[in-house]
Image: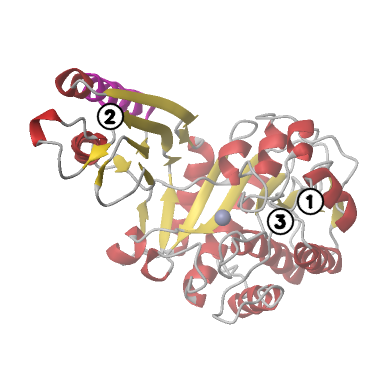
């Protein structure tokens, strides 16, 4: 068993074949959730699953589970998976790698005639990207009860088409009640989507946790006036007050390293005219960290700074929290299985806390879960130039294979 390895070439070829569905001119993929292209991608992967002898279950939100029986089918399956929908200018690997790595694990077990005690399943979750339909991570979110099936069905794209209608149309509205599907343990392999592994020249990222995030809308209200006749000391300039708050967002993140993050990525200026003192400025704040306690401290400091700034300047500042995702620590047993497999295979490794959301966060609410990261070129994803090395993808898949076998048990 120690010399068991996946077929990296076969994994790569499957990735390249799936990437042809919705291929873009710049070498990326556009395969939005529940489009005709998504149906083609789903059909291709399901066809591969059936050819590998797996049985298929589809739930009411279109999550697909492909199952390889174990010798004891009363045990809950060891599941791996991810998503095959992409961003409008997405790449070949985000999500797709996690699904096809699972398929490659099954193909390898078939080649060698290896039976596992617990069943093994490869899943793909509906609409992870949240690009065509909000919210993101929709399939896994419904599965774990984060929101209802009705809420998901009612989501509409910009053309007014709903998730419920589109699922029906592409033939992936299944019958199983979401969540009514046991999971013994959940693994997800994924490209890192950040630059840490490449920068440190490591092959495998062990993921102990996913960062939590706190999102805010901040609105500073002053008074619009002519930029010429109004003397400096008589202005109520919303922009100048916003400009005091923005560096503090970064300063707060820097006070809580190594995982503190602070970003202002969106700004609207009213009336947005060069010779008018801005009367109102609205901007977004995105704070992240790896523990609830740190994220709460960052939140308190943000609120305190905004209150003091309002008092000092006399302008009204509204800070509204619009989203909160708590940090998600992964299960020590699953993280341990990934560590063991990486050590056994001799790959260079480090811990990488995920800054991005994944289906594994929702899976973790129901079952012991964990992730395996591999490097991607320049840390770039959600971009047509997203790229990864075949040998890294193969290494991550080998880790997945051995970690899943540890959990499922070999007969
Ligand atoms: Zn993804």
For discs 2 and 3, the disc positioned in front in the rendered view: 2
Q: Are marks 2 and 1 in contact (CB under 8 Å)?
A: no
Mark earlier in primary sequence (1, 3): 3
For discs 2 and 1, the disc positioned in front in the rendered view: 2
Quadrant assignment for the N terminus:
bottom right
Mark earlier in primary sequence (2, 1): 1
How far apart are the alpha carbons under marks 1 and 3?
13 Å
Q: Which of 282/204 is in front? A: 282
Q: Is residue 97 above or below residue 20?
A: above
Q: Where residue 381 appears, x then y in whole percent?
A: 47, 63
Residue 251 visible: no
Q: Which of 269/107 is in front? A: 269
Residue 212: which quarter of the image? top left
Could you tell me what secondary structure mostly forms the magenta stretch? helix
Q: Which mark is residue 185?
A: none
Residue 155: which quarter of the image? top right
Q: Where residue 211 appears, x then y in whole percent?
A: 41, 39
How many numbered marks appear?
3
**Ligand 1, what quadrant?**
bottom right
Range covered by the magenta-colored residues: 291-307
Q: Which mark is residue 33?
A: 3
Q: Which of 131/275 is in front? A: 275
The residue beneath circle 1 is: 64
What residue is drawn where x is 47% and y is 75%? Answer: 389
- Give left or right: position of 282 versus 55: left
Residue 326 visible: yes
The residue beneath circle 2 is: 222
**Secondary structure of residue under mark 1:** strand
Q: Where residue 218 appears, x then y in whole percent?
A: 36, 32
For discs 1 and 3, the disc positioned in front in the rendered view: 3
């Amino acid at each position: 068993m120690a010399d068991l390895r996946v077929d990296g070439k076969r994994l790569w070829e499957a990735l390249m074949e799936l990437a042809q569905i919705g291929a873009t001119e710049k070498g990326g993929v556009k395969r939005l959730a529940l489009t005709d292209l998504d149906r083609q991608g789903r059909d291709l992967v399901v066809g591969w699953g059936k050819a590998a002898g797996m049985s298929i279950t589809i739930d009411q939100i279109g999550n697909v589970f492909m199952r390889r029986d174990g010798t004891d089918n009363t045990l809950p399956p060891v599941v791996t998976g991810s998503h095959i929908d992409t961003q409008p200018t997405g790449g070949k690997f985000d999500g797709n790698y996690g699904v096809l790595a699972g398929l490659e694990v099954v193909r390898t077990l078939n080649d060698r005639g290896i039976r596992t005690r617990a069943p093994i399943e490869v899943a793909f979750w509906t609409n992870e990207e949240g690009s065509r339909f909000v919210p993101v991570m929709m399939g896994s979110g419904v599965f774990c009860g984060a929101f209802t099936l009705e809420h998901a069905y009612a989501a509409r794209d910009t053309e007014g088409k709903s998730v419920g209608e589109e699922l029906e149309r592409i033939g992936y509205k299944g019958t199983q009640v979401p969540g009514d599907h046991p999971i013994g343990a959940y693994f997800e392999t994924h490209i890192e989507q950040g630059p840490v592994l490449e920068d440190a020249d490591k092959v495998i990222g062990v993921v102990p946790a996913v960062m939590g995030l706190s999102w805010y809308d901040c609105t500073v209200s002053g008074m619009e006036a002519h930029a010429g006749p109004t003397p400096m000391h008589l202005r109520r300039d919303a922009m100048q007050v916003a400009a005091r708050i923005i560096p503090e967002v970064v300063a707060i993140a820097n006070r809580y390293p190594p995982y503190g993050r602070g970003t202002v990525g969106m700004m609207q200026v009213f009336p947005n005219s060069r010779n008018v003192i801005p009367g109102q400025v609205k901007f977004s704040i995105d704070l992240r960290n790896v523990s609830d306690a740190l994220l709460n401290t960052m939140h308190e400091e943000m609120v305190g700074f905004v209150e003091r700034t309002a008092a000092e300047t006399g302008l009204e500042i509204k800070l509204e929290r619009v989203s909160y995702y708590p940090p998600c620590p992964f299960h020590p047993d699953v993280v341990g299985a990934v560590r063991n497999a990486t050590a056994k295979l001799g790959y260079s490794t480090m811990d990488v806390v995920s800054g991005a959301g994944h289906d594994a966060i929702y899976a973790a609410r129901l079952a012991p879960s964990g992730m395996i990261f591999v490097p991607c070129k320049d840390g770039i994803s959600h971009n047509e130039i997203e790229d990864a090395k075949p040998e890294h993808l193969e290494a991550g898949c080998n880790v997945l294979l051995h970690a899943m076998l540890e959990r499922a048990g070999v007969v």
